[in-house]
Image (cartoon, rainbow, N blue to C red):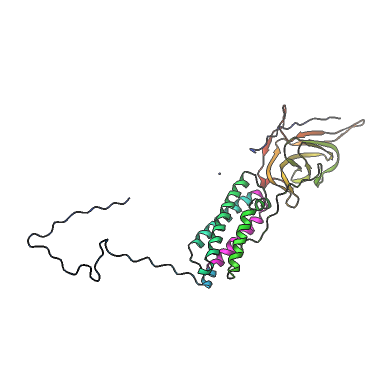
Amino acid sequence: MAAPRMISCALVLATLTLSACSATASGPSGGSPTAGGMAGGPGAPSADGPSASAAPSVSALAPEAYKGELEPRHKAMAGALKSVVGAGSVKSLNSRLEKAGEELDGAATALAALSPPEQVRPQHDAYVSSLREFATGLSAAAGKVGSRDLCTSSAVLTDLDDQLKALDKAGEALQDAGDYPADVVTVKAKNKQSRRLGNGTFIRRGGLGGRSSLQIHNGDSRDAVVTLVRGKTKALSVYVRKKAKYKIQGVGDGSYKIYFTHGVDWDGKSRAFTRDCGFERFQETVKFKTTYTATRIRWHDWQITLHAISGGNAKTTGVDPEDFPS
């Protein structure tokens, strides 16, 4: 039985004044200058110069006009947040967060310029302030997604839990004060989780029934999911916990590309880690082949490590999350 080995050299991915001048004109010659009028009389300028009238105050909007200003922004902001929740990949999540941040920041700026009905001025100001804080939080979350600290919409919502609650509270207060459309928060954040599958749990179980095996050693500090792809078909995926090993028995003959993702908190529904995620694949294709002769049967067994080791000979490369076989 031949048993070639493939030792990985997988590297953790590293792990965006104004002045005025005057000239004194000489008066006409001859005669004595005279001045008419009465000092201190009606209409006389004060010693400090002409009197200035106060700027007219901006009239507060009527309730219906105020609602008309809120309504289109309410719909746009609610739609932007819904779009974030529905993001199906890291890449789309990043772009949707950026757009949502711009949408809420623009709405806050526009609403801040309004003069709301006097009876809801406190609620209006609190709502605008919460919108600005949440917009800032969305922009910060986009940066965390870009660095792969956050990897799913659920993780983003959890990270923004305090801002979400503050915005929800402010929106409800404004709405209750006069049935104003301000309830843009339609989702709730879950508590931070660290979900894990058991070591060796198959997420996809196909391509078995052969004689070969694949030994996986995950010496990384994060759990991993290893996926074997044969041609364009995702053959199998298995969960390997950090600092653990697992041997896949019965791998069918064929040439396979091996992908793996590391991370924290496995979301079974989205089949992805929600935090601290990375995506890689081995550059070399792994071939499993069974050979039959009159006297013996030969097959291939392989061993891979998902962490850098001394003497490793298998290079890995980063993978765009959009191209990762989930």
Q: Residue at x 58, y 62 (%)?
A: 76
Main secondary structure found in the magenta portion: helix
The relative height of residue 132 versus residue 2 in the rendered view (above or below) is below
Report which quarter residue 313 is drawn in.
top right
Residue 36, position as x, y percentages in the image = 16, 68
Q: Is residue 182 visible?
A: no
| Residue 300 within the magenta-colored segment of the rendering | no
In front of the other: 96 or 120: 120
The relative height of residue 265 versus residue 188 in the rendered view (above or below) is above
Residue 58, position as x, y percentages in the image = 43, 67
129 relative to 239 in the view: left or right? left
Residue 13, position as x, y percentages in the image = 66, 38
Q: Residue most toward the front? A: 40
The N terminus appears in which quarter of the rendering?
A: top right
15 relative to 6 in the view: left or right? left
* Stretch of the chain drawn in magenta: 69-90
Q: Residue at x 30, y 65 (%)?
A: 51
Report which quarter residue 39 is drawn in.
bottom left
Q: Residue most toward the left? A: 30
Q: Is residue 43 visible?
A: yes
In front of the other: 244 or 163: 163
Residue 255, position as x, y percentages in the image = 77, 39
In front of the other: 302 or 77: 77
Q: Residue most toward the top? A: 311
3 relative to 279 in the view: left or right? right
Report which quarter residue 292 is drawn in.
top right
